[in-house]
Image (cartoon, rainbow, N blue to C red):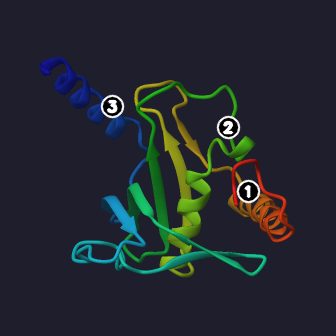
Amino acid sequence: WQRVLSRGREVAKTAFRDLPPPLEEQRTYVEVPFGYAGELSEGRPWDPAAVVTLDVAGFRLPLRGRIDRIDLDRDRKRARIVDFKTVGRVPDEDPGLKHGQELQRCIYAYVVRQLIPGIEAEAALLYPGQTNGYLPLPDFDGLFAELSKALAQAVGNVRQGRLPFGFT
């Protein structure tokens, strides 16, 4: 158990060291919920019960989750969203949305943009202690368009009764 605790402390120290410089008069929030009714809103950047939906092809998908870390500047004009990856290694190339392997950065940036309108949001993966371990989302608008297109195609398939085996 002591070894596990020691490893946790080392990962935490490394994660703080590997972050980019702070935003202007930065305020940091951790484990930030969205789409959760009944959570306390005090000390949060928004009401955790606020409903965020992804509207695609007439289909409304409610989103719910917890963002590892959000840094906001003093004026709430800029945000840095960090998703910590403590298992695995930094990929050789940015995963983008390849085969749905990495959707979190894109969804988290969408959520923050919905809950704080007009904000400039950078979403990144952080592999603490690994070389080149900070991976900001390269093109939110392009990746979000790609995600929306894939979801619209999935909605179309469902409406036409073309479902994967075992779904009804």
Upstream in the sequence, badge 2 or badge 3?
3
- Check disc 2: other Cα within 10 Å, few if <14, some if 14-19, many if 20+: some
Q: Quadrant of residue 85?
A: top left
In this rendering, position of residue 7 left or right of residue 46? left
Give the residue displayed 80% in from the left and 67% down from the top: 152
Q: Are marks 3 and 1 in contact (CB under 8 Å)?
A: no
Mark whose residue sits in front, 2 or 3:
2
How many numbered marks appear? 3
Of all residues shown, which one is farthest toward the top? 3
Mark on residue 16?
Answer: none
Furthest toward the left, the residue is 2
Q: Is residue 66 left or right of residue 94?
A: left
Q: Amino acid at mark 3?
A: Thr
| Location of residue 99 in the rendering, given as x and y in whole percent from the top left corner | 73, 42
Residue 69 lies, in percent from the top left, at: 38, 54
Question: Which mark is first along the chain, 1 or 3?
Answer: 3
Q: Is residue 77 toward the left or the right of residue 139 in the image?
A: left
Element carrying mark 3: helix
User: Can you tell which mark lies on residue 14?
Assistant: 3
Mark number displayed over residue 143:
1
Question: Foreground mark, 3 or 1?
Answer: 1
Q: Is residue 23 visible?
A: no
Contact check, label 2 and label 3, Cβ < 8 Å: no
Q: Is residue 89 above or below residue 141?
A: above
- Residue 139 image offset from top left, x and y in percent: 71, 55
Q: Which residue is mark 2?
A: 94
Residue 111 spot, x, y in % from top left: 53, 69
